[in-house]
DNA sequence: ACAAGACCCTGGCCGC
DNA sequence: TGCGGCCAGGGTCTTG
C-alpha cells in the first residue's frame, strides 16, 4: 500500500532508469488506468517526448517531459511501476506500458485493484493542474508546519481524518497515520479543535520521522503487491508499532494493541498509551 | 462551505 | 470443494 515513502522509492528508481530516454510508444490496456483522461492523448502525445526529470508531491509522482507535458502517476493501493526487458511478457494486471527509442527496456504499469491511474497534464506548470489541490508533504522544503498545525486545529473533525486529508498535508495514508498517532501517544478520534498546537505539531513530527525511517529501509510492504521498480519489496513492516499489530504488546507499555473500525477501514492503537476520548453525548 | 459517507476494484482468506 | 461475504484502502463524488 504505497504511501509517501513507497512512492518516493519508486520515484528514485524511475529517475535512475528513465531520465534522458525518449518514449517511442505508449499503450493503454485498461480504461480505468486512464479514467481521468482518455487513452488517446497517451498514444498521441507521448511518443517522441523525452523524459527530462521526475517529481513527487505526496503520493503522486510525475515524469517531466521535454514536450512541456507531464505524465502523472498515482499507484493507488496496488500499483507497481516495473522496468522490464522489452520482450518480457506482460503481467495479467498490466494496465499500460511505455516503450523507448533506445529499445533497452520498457516501463510496465501493473495494478491489480485498478485504483491507480495515469494522467497526462498539458499545462506545463511546475505543479500539474490535476493535483493543484494536493498540499505539500512533510518533506517539502516549503512545508509550513505552523500553518498546517493551525489548519488542522481549525477543522471540525478528528485527528486521524485530518492526517489523511491530502488537501491539508499530503503523503500520509492509513499505515503512517496509525504509526504517527502511536508515536505521539494520541488517539485518532481526538477532536482537532481540542488539541494543543504542541500535540498537533508532535504528531506531524512523528509522521515525518516514521516515514523517513521507512524511506531508509525502502518502504513498507505487506502483501507483495507493492514493489519498487526492480520488483524488490520493502521490508519496513518489521518495524511497525501499531498498524497491523492487533494483540501484539505495545512497545511502550506492553498492553495488547487493539483494532478499531474507522472510516470503513482499520485503525490500530494502544488502549493505554492512546486514550480514546470520551464520546460527546448528543442528547 | 464544510464534513462525512458511498463508491470504485480484485483476489486472498475465512467459515459453512 | 464451492461459494458467499469480508477485508485491504486512496481519492473522488455525492449527500447532508
Image: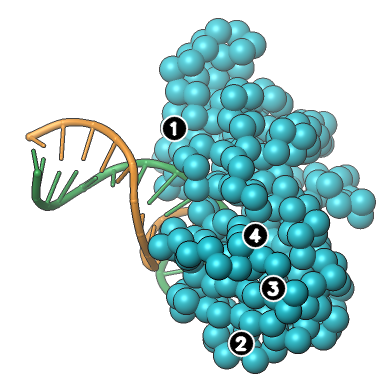
Chain colours: A cyan, B orange, C green
Q: Which residue position is annotated with label 1? A: A260
Among the 4 quarters of the image, the one containing residue A194: top right
Q: Which residue position is annotated with label 3? A: A103
**Which is nearer the eye, A241 or A228?**
A228
Q: CA distance from mark 3 to mark 4?
A: 12 Å
Image-based side of A78 in relation to A130, left or right: left
* Eye-nearest disc, 1 or 4: 4
Among the 4 quarters of the image, the one containing residue A180: top right
Among the 4 quarters of the image, the one containing residue A133: bottom right
Q: CA distance from mark 2 to mark 4?
A: 19 Å
Regarding mark 4 in the picture, which secondary structure is present there? strand
Image label count? 4
Residue B11, above or below B15: below
Where residue B1 appears, x then y in whole percent? 68, 69
Residue A6, above or below A247: below
**Which is nearer the eye, A248 or A66?**
A66
Chain holding disc 1: A
Q: Can residue A56 be spotted in the picture?
A: no
Instruction: Give the label on residue A43, or none.
Output: 2
Where residue A170 appears, x then y in whole percent? 72, 53
Q: Which residue position is annotated with label 4? A: A83
Say which label, 2 or 3, has the lower sequence index.
2
Same chain letter for marks 3 and 1: yes
Say which label, 3 or 4, has the lower sequence index.
4
Same chain letter for marks 2 and 3: yes
Say which label, 3 or 1, has the lower sequence index.
3
Name the residue: 64% across, 31% down.
A236
Marks 1,4: beta carbons within 8 A: no
Q: Residues within 10 Å of mark 2 (few under 14, many from 20)?
A: some
Chain holding disc 3: A
Chain holding disc 4: A
Name the residue: 46% across, 61% down.
A91
Amino acid at each position: 500500500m504505497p504511501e509517501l515513502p513507497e512512492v518516493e522509492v519508486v520515484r528514485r528508481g524511475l529517475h535512475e532508469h528513465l531520465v534522458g530516454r525518449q518514449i517511442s510508444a505508449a499503450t493503454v490496456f485498461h480504461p480505468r488506468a486512464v479514467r481521468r483522461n482518455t487513452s488517446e492523448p497517451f498514444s498521441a502525445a507521448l511518443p517522441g517526448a523525452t523524459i527530462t526529470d521526475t517529481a513527487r508531491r505526496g503520493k503522486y509522482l510525475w515524469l517531466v517531459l521535454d514536450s512541456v507535458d507531464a505524465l502523472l502517476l498515482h499507484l493507488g493501493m496496488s500499483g507497481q511501476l516495473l522496468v522490464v526487458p522489452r520482450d518480457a511478457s506482460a503481467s495479467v494486471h498490466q494496465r499500460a506500458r511505455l516503450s523507448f527509442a533506445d529499445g533497452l527496456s520498457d516501463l510496465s504499469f501493473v495494478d491489480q485493484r485498478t485504483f491507480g491511474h495515469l494522467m497526462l497534464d498539458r499545462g506545463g506548470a511546475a505543479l500539474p493542474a490535476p493535483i493543484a489541490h494536493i498540499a505539500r508533504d512533510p518533506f517539502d522544503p516549503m512545508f509550513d508546519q505552523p500553518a498546517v498545525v493551525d489548519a488542522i486545529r481549525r477543522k471540525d473533525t478528528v485527528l486521524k481524518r485530518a492526517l489523511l486529508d491530502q488537501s491539508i498535508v499530503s503523503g500520509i495514508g492509513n499505515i503512517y497515520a496509525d504509526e504517527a498517532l502511536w508515536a505521539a501517544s494520541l488517539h485518532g478520534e481526538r477532536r482537532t479543535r481540542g488539541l494543543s498546537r504542541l500535540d498537533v505539531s508532535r504528531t506531524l513530527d512523528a509522521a515525518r520521522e516514521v516515514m523517513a525511517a521507512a524511506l531508509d529501509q525502502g518502504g513498507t510492504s505487506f502483501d507483495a503487491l507493492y514493489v519498487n521498480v526492480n520488483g524488490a519489496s520493502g521490508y519496513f513492516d518489521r518495524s511497525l508499532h501499531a498498524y497491523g499489530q492487533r494483540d501484539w504488546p505495545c512497545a511502550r507499555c506492553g498492553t495488547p494493541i487493539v483494532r478499531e473500525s474507522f472510516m470503513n477501514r482499520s485503525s490500530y492503537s494502544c488502549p493505554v498509551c492512546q486514550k480514546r476520548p470520551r464520546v460527546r453525548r448528543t442528547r
